[in-house]
Image: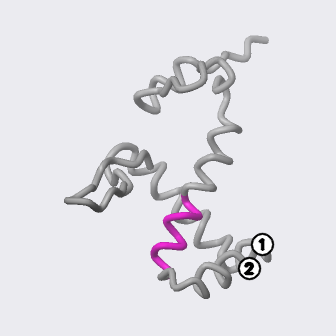
């Protein structure tokens, strides 16, 4: 879900990196799809952004970013990463997670 440069000429923009962890991307898509059909605040967001002229695909892209931020905060071991530091892969995240030892 990390953005990559997709600028051309004077237009400066970013697009989503479709590579990386495909299972994580699939999970985010499913979460957004379910929320769009069941959660009131997501339905309101969809309606508002559609009224601004955004396509359903653009709105889903925005929602996936919001969900990714929510999920990232819930992953174990994320408090150990410094601000601005990024884990390079899911394996790095799992390796940095504290182990529950009984």
Instruction: Determine whether the residue tagged by mark 1 lies in a helix, strand or loop.
Output: helix
Disc 1 designates what residue?
41
* Residue 61 is one of the magenta-drawn residues: yes
User: In the figure, 9 relative to 91: above or below?
Assistant: below
Q: Could you say where residue 101 lies in the image, as x and y percent from the top left?
A: 74, 11
Residues under numbered marks 2 and 1 in contact, where contact means CB atoms less than 8 Å apart? yes
* Residue 38 is one of the magenta-drawn residues: no
Residue 102 in the figure: left or right of residue 76: right
Q: In the rendering, which numbered label is found on residue 54? A: none
Q: In the rendering, which numbered label is found on residue 44? A: 2
User: In the figure, 67 relative to 58: above or below?
Assistant: above
Q: Could you say where residue 42 lies in the image, as x and y percent from the top left?
A: 71, 72
Q: Could you say where residue 102 lies in the image, as x and y percent from the top left?
A: 79, 12
* Residue positioned 55% across, 65% down in the render: 30
Tell me where the magenta segment starts and ends, as one range. Answer: 56-64
Q: Residue furthest front?
A: 10
* Near-viewer residue (94 or 87): 87
């Amino acid at each position: 879900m990390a953005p990559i440069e997709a600028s051309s000429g004077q237009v400066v923009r970013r697009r989503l990196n479709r590579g990386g962890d495909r299972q994580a991307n699939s999970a985010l898509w499913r979460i957004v799809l379910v929320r769009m059909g069941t959660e009131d605040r997501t339905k309101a967001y969809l309606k508002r952004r559609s009224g601004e002229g955004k396509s359903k695909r653009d709105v889903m892209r925005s929602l996936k970013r919001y969900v990714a931020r929510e999920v990232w905060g819930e992953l174990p071991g994320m408090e150990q990463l410094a601000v601005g530091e990024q884990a390079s892969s899911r394996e790095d995240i799992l390796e940095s997670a504290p182990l529950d030892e009984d």
